[in-house]
Amino acid sequence: MGEPMNLAMIGCGNIAAQYLASLERLPGLRLVAVCDAVPAAAERVSAETGVPARSVEEVLADPAVDAVLNLTIPAAHAPVTIAALEAGKHVYLEKPFATSLADADAMVAAAEKAGRRIGSAPDTALGTGIQTARQLVDSGRIGTAVAATAFMMNPGHESWHPNPAFYYQHGGGPLLDMGVYYLTALVTLLGPVEAVTAMGSRIRTERPVPAGAPRAGEVLTVEVDTHVSAVLRHTSGVTSTLVVSFDAVASQLPRIEVYGSEATLDVPDPNRFDDPVRFCATPRGRDFTEVEPTAGYRDAGRGYGLADMARAIADGGPHRQSTELGYHVNEVMERVLESIREQRQTAVVSRCERPAVVPLDATPDVA
């Protein structure tokens, strides 16, 4: 790989620290500017990192900036991404890809017109956890894949997040905020989805922020379903069940399980990179054995998907967290919401290739 890609980070909120921690060890990327709609936020990150704080307008007009890391709130994903693409920048953005299919279509059209790439979080699927599970599925260790279950059950983010309001507004909720991790993992493991059936609920229209939380005393307006249950049919014939909730006080359900004709996989939390995979081939057995990693980036962090995109741009090959993958997962979520509204099975139109497996001990600037 040649010179690093010059990168401007737009959005200096809660998730930015995790990207900054990874960028320090990714040789294919060079952070040259940080921006935020709240200048004080950009100045704070600038003081911590030594990277200049600049306005979005300055960054987009600078031909030395190759790409934008879009860490804005979901509602700003489309306008910021489209503006960056039109300025000739590649874009890697935080999840969700967009808050509507219309926005997603506009982003893809802008990328095609500009001849630039979009990469999309979550890249947690590139760590040793999901990648090892993927390798076990592909190798036939579980026999023929039959079905999968995925559960994300928690009480919501207001007890800890410094700015929780947008999680309960359009573009938020447990599906677009957290379900995207599970759907990205399921598509990586089992292939694209062709149809969905779903139901949803919200038990309250307002959520008070509890004492001791950063926004204690505020009352958040709920505009979205905070509990969603969906059945997905993959093009492979496998069916997956997904349940995501901001209304569960506690849970002992597994994060993801994949059921094969010969064995079951206990797949780790898709919001993490390197938790272990467990495997059981004993009928009615309860003793799952831990599997040594066989694929994936070791010790990965947020930003590895961006580094993989930078490598792919330099090489002229595909990047794993592709436009097609991000768009497809986004459409699946939109079709789930459509199924809830219309109380019927809904077809998913888009398709994507499963990203190539990450070889064990690869680095994102090489493989």
Image (cartoon, grey):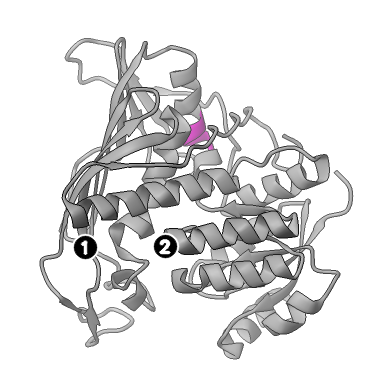
Of labels 2 and 1, the one closer to you: 2
- Is residue 271 visible from the viewing direction of this image? no
Task: Give the percent coordinates (x, y) of residue 144.
Answer: 36, 13
Task: Give the percent coordinates (x, y) of residue 219.
Answer: 21, 84
**Chief secondary structure of the magenta portion:** helix
Q: Residues within 10 Å of mark 2 (few under 14, many from 20)?
A: some
- Determine which residue is flagged by label 1: 225
- Determine which residue is flagged by label 2: 100
- Identify whether 58 is placed above or below 301: below
- Whether the magenta-drawn stretch holds residue 130 is answered as yes
Q: Nearer the viewer, residue 109 or 223?
A: 109
Q: In which quarter of the image is the N terminus?
A: top right
Q: How crowded is mark 1: few (under 14 residues within 10 Å), some or many (20 or more)?
A: many
Q: Start and end of the magenta stretch?
A: 127-131
Q: Quadrant of the C terminus?
A: top right
- Identify whether 158 is placed above or below 138: below
Which quarter of the figure has residue 82? Answer: bottom right
* Residue at 69% across, 42% down: 364
Amino acid at dot 1 = Asp
Q: Nearer the viewer, residue 165 or 85?
A: 85
Circle 2 SS class: loop
Amino acid at dot 2 = Ser
Which quarter of the figure has residue 11? Answer: bottom right
- Is residue 223 visible from the viewing direction of this image? yes
Query: Which comes before the other along the chain, label 2 or label 1?
Result: 2
